[in-house]
């Protein structure tokens, strides 16, 4: 937006965001001595114009935009105007306020966020920690991390979240909103805040329809199995898709798996509690077909600790989008996701008469407390038989030897 197109002042948020740079730096009046400065490289900052005691005009910087929003810049300018009306030097007033803020650095939103992360970290899976902390460090802390958390208004949170919404990153926006709301809950329950400025914002923000559990109908399943078997790109991803189908584990549990967790001789996969959603160890019996896929995969990646080492770093697991991207390439976008294989396994096994307790244990949906641990142990051999039947059943489907009916059950 050219400055000649400005229609009103104070400047609207959309105007501030879209002001175009020119060959030379320029300042544009916002309100009552407050100006936005736009440099040729596009960087913007706030300047306050005031008259010194000797009658000469001078400028005082109030921070960079958008780190300092329009609302905050106007608040700072109003404070300086009040100081001048009382006969105080605005430069001295600014320095005094900065000193007070430095003294209160323990009350910044970033310090509160780090405290919350320390409290929650032990309960997160590595993938959850990476997503949660990464989203905060990318979208929140650079913008308002240095602010006193008690002074950040609901409208500022709405503007930040709306900016993410406008970029189309709805899922990340929702994750950021939930995290920040919980961060403020920590301050509130520990007596450091009286209200939560993110309370009620979700009603005015977009929510993305859940696609994590999308899965094909059983009539489409044979074609999907054949498409996966013929996947022409990365062979490790092809085998990974087959293993997701054959084991019923969550995608992150397979994607981050280590070869050390597998006993191929005994046909067992022992997933440690640190990598499980419920923070409990989980034992997965492996069918003959799953063992065959693992042995083929070992030829490709057995030299590394991870089953699915990343392309850029062999010590990092493949991207969390790797399996879903493969399904999209196969033409199943919106119809089948990696997590959706758990739904197919659950419904197929239940429809063919396998006990709910065995199926739930295979999916690591166990009871709380001692009962859950007990059931997990006694169902291992039953689950071994069940998953071998399931692998054989999938083979028959792929070759067209089984007639299917529709199923729609949803499993978390």
Image (spheres, rainbow, N blue to C red):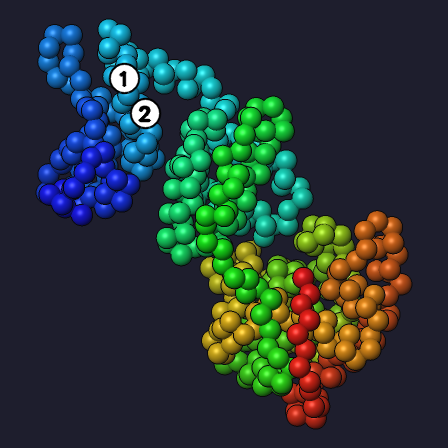
Q: Earlier in the sequence, mark 1 or mark 2?
A: 2
The crowd level at tag 2 (other Cα within 10 Å; few <14, some 14-19, many 20+) is few
Q: Are marks 1 and 2 in contact (CB under 8 Å)?
A: no
Tell me which corner region of the image, top left, top right, bottom left or bottom right, holds residue 117.
top right
Query: Is 37 rendered above or below residue 304?
Result: above
Q: Residue at x 86, y 66 (%)?
A: 379
When the figure is inspected, residue 70 is found, relative to residue 236, above or below; the finding is: above
Quadrant of the image occupied by residue 224 = bottom right
- Report x, y in % for residue 270: 75, 60
Q: Is residue 188 visible?
A: yes
Quick check: 193 above or below 164?
Answer: above
Q: Is residue 113 left or right of residue 405?
A: left
Q: Position of residue 120 (x, y in %)?
A: 63, 39
Q: Quadrant of the C terminus?
A: bottom right
Q: Residue at x 77, y 74 (%)?
A: 350
10 Å crowding of disc 1: few (<14), some (14-19), many (20+): many
Element at label 2: helix
Q: Nearer the viewer, residue 3 or 297?
A: 3
Q: Residue at x 31, y 38 (%)?
A: 66
Residue under pointer 1: 80
Q: Is residue 387 visible?
A: no
The number of discs equals: 2
Q: CA distance from mark 1 to mark 2?
A: 9 Å
> In the image, residue 68 lies at what x, y percent?
33, 32
Q: Residue at x 66, y 74 (%)?
A: 408
> For mark 2, what is the residue?
75
């Amino acid at each position: 937006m050219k400055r000649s197109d400005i229609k009103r002042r104070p400047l609207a948020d959309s105007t501030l965001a879209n002001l175009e740079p020119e060959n030379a730096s320029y300042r544009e009046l916002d309100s009552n001595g407050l100006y936005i400065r736009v440099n040729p490289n596009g960087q913007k900052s706030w300047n306050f114009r005031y008259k010194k005691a000797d009658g000469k005009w001078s400028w005082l910087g109030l921070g960079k935009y958008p780190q300092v929003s329009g609302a905050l810049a106007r608040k700072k300018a109003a404070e300086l105007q009040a100081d001048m009306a009382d006969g105080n030097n605005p430069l001295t007033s600014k320095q005094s306020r900065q000193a007070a803020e430095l003294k209160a650095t323990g009350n910044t939103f970033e310090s509160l966020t780090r405290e919350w992360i320390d409290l929650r970290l032990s309960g997160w899976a590595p993938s959850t920690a990476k997503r949660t902390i990464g989203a905060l460090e990318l979208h929140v802390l650079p913008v308002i991390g240095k602010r006193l958390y008690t002074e950040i208004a609901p409208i500022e949170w709405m503007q930040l979240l709306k900016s993410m919404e406008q970029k189309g990153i709805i899922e990340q926006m929702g994750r950021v909103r939930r995290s920040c709301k919980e961060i403020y809950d920590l301050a509130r329950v520990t007596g450091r805040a009286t209200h939560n400025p993110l309370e009620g914002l979700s009603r005015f923000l977009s929510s993305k329809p859940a696609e994590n559990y999308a899965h094909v109908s059983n009539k489409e399943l044979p074609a999907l199995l054949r498409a996966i078997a013929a996947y022409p790109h990365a062979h490790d991803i092809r085998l990974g898709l087959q293993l997701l189908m054959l084991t019923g584990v969550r995608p992150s549990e397979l994607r981050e798996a280590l070869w050390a967790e597998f006993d191929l001789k005994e046909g067992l996969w022992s997933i440690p509690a640190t990598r499980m959603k419920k923070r409990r160890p989980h034992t997965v019996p492996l069918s003959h077909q799953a063992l065959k896929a693992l042995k083929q995969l070992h030829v490709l990646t057995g030299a590394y600790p991870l089953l699915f080492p990343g392309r850029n770093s062999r010590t990092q697991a493949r991207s969390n989008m790797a399996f879903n991207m493969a399904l999209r390439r196969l033409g199943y976008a919106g119809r089948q996701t990696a997590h959706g294989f758990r739904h197919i396994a659950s419904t197929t096994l239940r429809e063919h008469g396998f006990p709910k307790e065995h199926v739930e244990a295979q999916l690591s949906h166990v009871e709380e407390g001692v009962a859950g641990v007990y059931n997990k142990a006694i169902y291992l051999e039953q689950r071994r038989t069940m998953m071998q039947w399931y692998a054989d059943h999938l083979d028959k489907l792929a070759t067209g030897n089984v007639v299917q009916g529709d199923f729609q059950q949803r499993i978390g």
